Structure formats: structure tokens, C-alpha cells
């Protein structure tokens, strides 16, 4: 009999990370379960969102350092090398630097 994975096994636990805004020299903490877009908006940084699911590409922003965890379906592999959908992305590294 095959055992189905539990939720804990199927999805890795999220961890918090710091968001660094290169041009505005801001550093913002992103907690587990919190979206980058929400953190930006709460800090007064204008960011446009529409679908908030990583489908439309409205929130795509250039990133310059860190290791983004891309969870969108709107960017190609080539586009993901320089851009991230801030509505749904996370970060594998302790910090993610955006060109903002």
C-alpha cells in the first residue's frame, strides 16, 4: 500500500528573510507566510498587483542579489534570472535585494 505524503512532507517550511531595497536603502523583514508585495505596500513602497497569484506579471520587479524562490507562472526561465513576481515569490537566501 502506498503512503501519501503529509502536508509537512509535501511542502518545505517557509522561513523569514530580509528584503533589501537597493535604490531607497531600506531593509524590510518578510515573515513566513507574508508576501513581498504586502511588505512593500505596508512600508509605503508603491507596487502594482492584480492577480496576486503570479499569473499576470503586473508585480514583476528586477532583483539584483539573493536567491529568489520563484513561485510564479508568468516569467520564463530567462526572465527569472533578472526579475521576480513579488506577489508570490519567497527567498532561499537570508536576503533578497530588489532594484527599488
Image (spheres, rainbow, N blue to C red):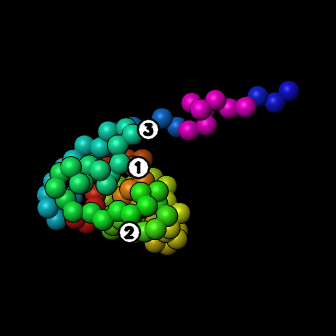
User: The C terminus appears in which quarter of the rendering?
Assistant: bottom left
From the top left corner, tell me how far across and down residue 42 is, in percent.
21, 49
Q: Earlier in the sequence, mark 2 or mark 3?
A: 3
Question: For mark 3, does the 10 Å Cα neighbourhood hold few (<14), some (14 to 19), or many (20 or more) residues?
Answer: few
> Which residue is at 57% across, 30% downward?
8
Callout 1–callout 3 Cβ contact below 8 Å: yes
Q: Quadrant of residue 24?
A: bottom left
Give the Cα distance between marks 2 and 3.
24 Å
* Residue interval drawn in magenta: 4-11
Vertical placement of 30 versus 62: above or below?
Answer: above
Task: Give the residue furthest to the front.
Answer: 50
Q: Which of the numbered marks, if any, corresponds to residue 69? A: none
Q: Which residue is mark 3?
A: 14
Q: Which residue is mark 1?
A: 90
Question: For mark 1, does the 10 Å Cα neighbourhood hold few (<14), some (14 to 19), or many (20 or more) residues?
Answer: many
> Which residue is at 42% across, 53% downward?
88
> Which residue is at 46% across, 68% downward?
56
Q: Quadrant of residue 16?
A: top left
Residue 3 visible in the shown view: yes
Question: For mark 2, does the 10 Å Cα neighbourhood hold few (<14), some (14 to 19), or many (20 or more) residues?
Answer: some
Q: Is residue 14 left or right of residue 24?
A: right
From the top left corner, tell me how far across and down residue 18 is, in percent.
27, 46
> Which of these two is toward me, 32 or 64?
32
User: Does the magenta run of residues contain 42?
Assistant: no
From the top left corner, tell me how far across and down residue 70 is, in percent.
47, 57
Q: Earlier in the sequence, mark 2 or mark 1?
A: 2
> Which of these two is toward me, 1 or 37?
37
Question: Judging from the image, what secondary structure is the residue with disc 2 in?
Answer: loop
Residue 64 visible in the shown view: no
Q: Which residue is mark 2?
A: 58
Q: Is residue 14 left or right of residue 19?
A: right
Q: Earlier in the sequence, mark 1 or mark 3?
A: 3
Amino acid at each position: 500500500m502506498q503512503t501519501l505524503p503529509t502536508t509537512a512532507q509535501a511542502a518545505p517550511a517557509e522561513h523569514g528573510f530580509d528584503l533589501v531595497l537597493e535604490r531607497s536603502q531600506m531593509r524590510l523583514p518578510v515573515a513566513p507566510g507574508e508576501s513581498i508585495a504586502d511588505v512593500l505596500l505596508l512600508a509605503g513602497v508603491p507596487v502594482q498587483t492584480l492577480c496576486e497569484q503570479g499569473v499576470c506579471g503586473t508585480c514583476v520587479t528586477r532583483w539584483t542579489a539573493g536567491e529568489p524562490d520563484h513561485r510564479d507562472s508568468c516569467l520564463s526561465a530567462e526572465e527569472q534570472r533578472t526579475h521576480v513576481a513579488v506577489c508570490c515569490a519567497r527567498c532561499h537566501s537570508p536576503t533578497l535585494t530588489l532594484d527599488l
